[in-house]
Amino acid sequence: MRVLGIETSCDETSVAIYDQCQGLLVNKVYSQDSLHADYGGVVPELAARDHVRKIVPLILSTLRQVYLKPEDINGIAYTAGPGLIGSLLVGATVARTFAYACKIPAIDIHHMEAHLLAPMLEKKAPEFPFVALLVSGGHTQLVFASNIGEYKILGESIDDAVGEVFDKIAILLGLKYPGGALLSQMAQQGITDRYIFPRPMIDRPGLNLSFSGLKTFAVNTIMSSAHDVQTHADIARAFEDAIVETLAIKCRRALDQTGLKCLVVSGGVSANHALRAYLARMMHILKGKLFFPSPEFCTDNGAMVAYTGFIRLKAGLFSDLPILVRPRWSLESLPRIR
Ligand code: KG4
Ligand code: ZN
């Protein structure tokens, strides 16, 4: 069985093919970063129009790269939400049209489930049940994952997502959008403890998170400090340290609360080196297991969509709907194995 996956929920157009026997055959990602850089964030209408231009040529070149034809594909998986409505509609329309023409199933995929399952693409894959920390540009969630489709949100950001805050502070530090990874690079030159930023909501019970206060703290610090390279690096360091430690404290709490020893971290921000290193130390001390996707599968990609589509197609867990996308969609409402 072979599934072609299409990801167009935001500003990456990506297509991949997952094969039951051989695993991931190909994953091609076209990033719109340069298109949105001047605006300091994604412009939804520009994103949708660019997906229209790129998606069909990308599907054809993906098939060509692995010497496959449309008739060699057994299902088309596509991100049906959450995401930007225009971008989602492009992927959904192309996927359902392709599926109709080839008389194969189209599988609607939840973007955050795809992130959550991305570490399963690795040789060393996690096994259910586990706690997942999903950290992307649009979401920050702690999830109890007991099986495919069985997800309980333990906590989430009550305001900004972590990636979003990284990107906003990066712009104020003079970095290009999306600046999460660039801010992290800058932080490596920073001196620890020259600035100390708050760790939001750690003294409150529960697993919810909040990052808008930290964002404001960072903005005020930047505005009231000198604008030299070292000061910017020191602020980046303090900001990253605060985010990493806050996320780690909440992960530890989620593990304690659920009694689980296995932590999966995924989504764009899971590519962050400081976060990976800190959690690795923590899980070593806790004698637990820690799983990340490889960096190329942390940020948005078709591979995680193709893989999730393969799992859902095999289990018959997808909806045979017309073209329907959901800009907002709860991870707790997915079809599950009975
Ligand atoms: O999962 P993703 O590709 O898209 C969404 O679903 O939102 O995540 C993108 C986010 C951006 O905010 C980007 O700046 C952030 O992930 N990101 C990082 C790093 N790499 C990507 N943030 C911090 N450190 C990184 N190394
Ligand atoms: Zn994403």
Image (cartoon, helix red, strand yellow):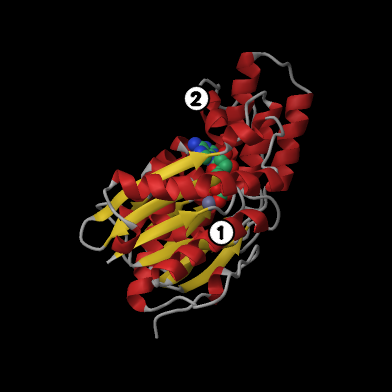
The spot of residue 273 in percent (x, y) is 44, 36
Q: Which residue is mark 1?
A: 141
Residue at (62, 57) in percent of width and height? 83
The spot of residue 81 in percent (x, y) is 58, 63
- Say which quadrant the C terminus sits in: bottom left
Q: Which residue is mark 2?
A: 188
Report, in whole angstroms, how far the alpha carbon at label 2 lies from the one at label 1: 26 Å
Q: Are marks 2 and 1 in contact (CB under 8 Å)?
A: no
Front-most of residues 126 and 208: 126
Front-most of residues 289 and 159: 159
Query: Which residue is outermost to the bottom?
Result: 338
Query: Which residue is outermost to the top?
Result: 228
Does residue 19 appear to the left or right of 105 in the view shown? left
Quadrant of the rendered image holding ligand 1: top right
Residue at (34, 50) in percent of width and height? 63
Q: Is residue 285 visible?
A: no
Q: Is residue 141 visible?
A: yes
